[in-house]
Amino acid sequence: MAKVKSAFFCQNCGAQSPKWIGKCPSCGEWNTYVEEVIQQEAKPTINAFTAAADKPTLISEITSGSTPRITMPDKELNRVLGDGLVPGSLTLFGGEPGIGKSTLLLQIALAVKNLRVLYISGEESQEQLNMRAKRIGIKNQECYILTETLIQNIFQQAEAVKPQLLVIDSIQTLYTGQIDSAPGSISQIRQCTADLMRYAKTTQVPVFIIGHITKDGSIAGPKVLEHMVDTVLQFEGDTHHLYRLLRTTKNRFGSTNELGIYEMTGGGLREVSNPSEVLITAREEPVSGVAIAAITEGARPLLIETQALVSSAVYGTPQRSSTGYDLRRLSMMLAVLEKRCGFRLGAKDVFLNIAGGIKVEDPATDLAIVTAILSSSEEIPVSPKFCFAAEIGLSGEIRPVNRIEQRISEAEKMGFEQIFISRYNKKSIPEKTAIKVVTVGKMEEFFGKVFG
Ligand code: TYD
Ligand code: MG
């Protein structure tokens, strides 16, 4: 009987060690080593495809652009991929359970035209997949479904079907016969991803992989998974909210920080092509504590609603809570208002919320946040025809932000009448605008202009 050999793998970076160690020498994390069984005898590699022998070529002699990108049926996906799918690329879709990863990929598999798709599921049976496909309601004659978890079998089937797009529903369920450890373990994930990578690169078939996410938001398994693939897309959003955001966190073929927006409906995911319309609540009358921010997500301008509620603290220590916006940044805004503008908010509870369940990181949200807080605190509604785009510095100055033309034109398109921006952005304002552009330099000046 072959002796079982085991090794220890760092759960964070995937480094290997023959013994358990407390601190990983390669990434410096503590207590991340876990024992896994590995095969002692090297089995012959059972790959159903053969790699063509490559020789070194001068970079100037490589002909590029011979294989054009594949345009996906889904505009949002095209955007996050960076204008279409690159042949032979490996794309990882991460996201929490129940967010809609399987739905999205099955929907794409069904919607692509003139492409033979092989959808491998290790999580659901063929009947279950068929039920889901019926729910989505798109028919595709060239979409093959296979429930399989052994990677060698998958390659064998792929050899027979010759797909032009391969979808793997969850890398955590796959395993290779070459390694003895359980599916989902580090060494299995690493080996299966490496095999899929080799498959993609040699056959030029694009591969989509679904990856589970852990409690703390990282993709389950080692970071090596993210290092190995070409593109990492995160599917996020609150399962209680309708909207789902598809974010690029890594992209070898395009820009990161792109954003795709979907809405979960009874019949699958629907693309949201005009997000500003859905993220802003249509109101009859102005209410206090609401201000609209003109932000950008990647290259995409978006108008979002920021809401604040300021009330007297019932308990000794005032509460500060924030959803969708950095809490530390909120504290900073409150300190600026207190120190530079003389508003007494120290004894008040402040609650902040970004409507629609989205998270913003764009500093251009600052001005809208401050406006919403003051509007709530003073009980003065802000005109629903105003929007804001500027960062606020610690000295209370209103600072410029990038892509101001795009923000202005989006606000104009959405029918806003005034946009408040920094004085230092003046140079980049387009000459003729239907919207009134108000430039401000200091907070004091700003309040006069907004609240009159
Ligand atoms: P699913 O794709 O199974 O999530 P994941 O693969 O990321 O774990 O999505 C599951 C959720 O989506 C489930 O809670 C039900 C919901 N859903 C709809 O609302 N409408 C639909 O048409 C489908 C297929 C799913
Ligand atoms: Mg799933």
Image: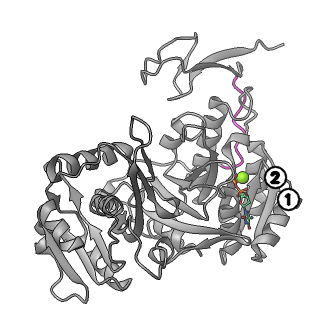
Residue 83, how many percent across, how many down?
45, 70
Element on which disc 2 rests: loop
The percent coordinates of residue 259 (x first, y second) are 46, 63
75 lies left or right of 164: left
Left or right of 77 on screen, residue 113? right
Q: Nearer the viewer, residue 315 or 333?
A: 315
Please state which amino acid type lies under the numbered disc 1.
Answer: Gln
Ligand 2 closer than 8 Å to label 2 CB: yes
Magenta range is: 42-49
Q: Residue at x 76, y 34 (%)?
A: 177
* On-image quarter of the N terminus: top right
Whether the residues at callouts 1 and 2 have beta carbons within 8 Å, the answer is: yes
Colour scheme employed for the rendering of this structure: one colour
Residue nearest the observer in this picture, 146 or 367: 367
Mark yes or no: residue 294 visible: yes
The disc label shown at residue 124, or none = 2
**Image-based side of 406 in relation to 149, left or right:** left
Which residue does the numbered mark 1 point to in the structure image?
128
Q: Is residue 251 visible?
A: no
Q: Residue at x 75, y 76 (%)?
A: 138
- Main SS of the magenta part reads loop
